[in-house]
Amino acid sequence: MTAVPVAHTPRATLTPLRMLALAMTTAATAVAALAYSPVQAAGYAPSGAFVQVGAGENELKSLNVGAVWPCACLQGLLGGRVDGHIEANLGYWNVRGVNGRSSYGSVAVVPMFRYRFDQGRSPWFVEAGIGAVLTDRLYETRSKRFSTALNFSDNVAVGYRLSPKDEVSLRVQHISNASFKKPNPGENFVQVRYAFSY
């Protein structure tokens, strides 16, 4: 009997850029776990929750629900107040795919920093953060296909506090893998969030 040769798939090399991307993802996860301060030392309970809806290219629609853990505060910066928090969320994406509509699940962890104007007295705020998002499989539409299920999540937002306990914000999110694997088309979301604190 003649042996059949086995084809071997070339293994991806760990380039410096890939090592940096891996380190950043690990760091974002570690920061989320530690939450800068002892994550409400008494029980690890979140301080609030949110729900958001979004849209993107190829008739992309998204729904996310998540929780927020507070971090350290830096008061008096540039005439305002800077707060940090960690947010974790579960998402559902529905998009016009190659063979009709396709659905995806996601989980994300994102450290965020918020700037509130007028020493924190203003109801207006802006915030930004970079974290990690993992989808249940490779994301694909009629015009693009991701090469990784684990990607970075870049977020910016402007918001308004309706009361001391609830707020609304308009957010822009960009998801991509920082080009550590090709193709890396990225995806953009525009989202509206309602959040409340306990």
Image (cartoon, rainbow, N blue to C red):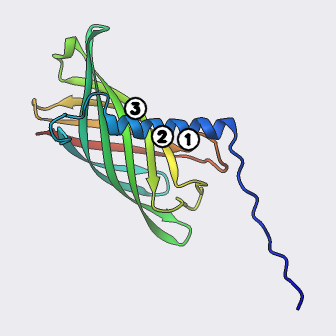
The three-letter code of the residue at mark 3 reads Gly
- Image spot of residue 127 (x, y percent): 33, 28
Q: Which residue lies at the image location 23% right of the left edge and 23% below the top edge?
A: 124
For residue 5, side relative to residue 192 (left or right): right
- Residue under the image location 52 percent in, 55 percent down: 149
Q: Secondary structure at mark 1?
A: helix
SS for tag 2? helix
The location of residue 187, given as percent across then percent down, is: 51, 47
- Quick check: 44 left or right of 94? left
Q: Nearer the viewer, residue 112 or 43?
A: 43
Residue beneath the point at 54% across and 37% down = 23
Q: Is residue 157 above or below residue 77?
A: below
Q: Nearer the viewer, mark 3 or mark 1?
A: 1
Badge 2 is on which residue? 26
Q: CA distance from mark 2 to mark 1?
A: 6 Å
User: Which disc, if any, is residue 22?
Assistant: 1
Q: Amino acid at mark 1?
A: Leu
* Residue tagged 3: 129
Disc 2 residue type (three-letter):
Thr
In this view, the residue in front, 43 or 139, is 43
Q: Residue lying at the far right in this picture: please name it.
A: 2
**Residue 122 to residue 92: above or below:** above
The residue sitting at 38% across, 29% down in the picture is 128
Mark 3 crowd level (few <14, some 14–19, many ≥20, 10 Å Cα): some
Q: Are marks 2 and 1 in contact (CB under 8 Å)?
A: yes
Q: Residues within 10 Å of mark 1 (few under 14, many from 20)?
A: some
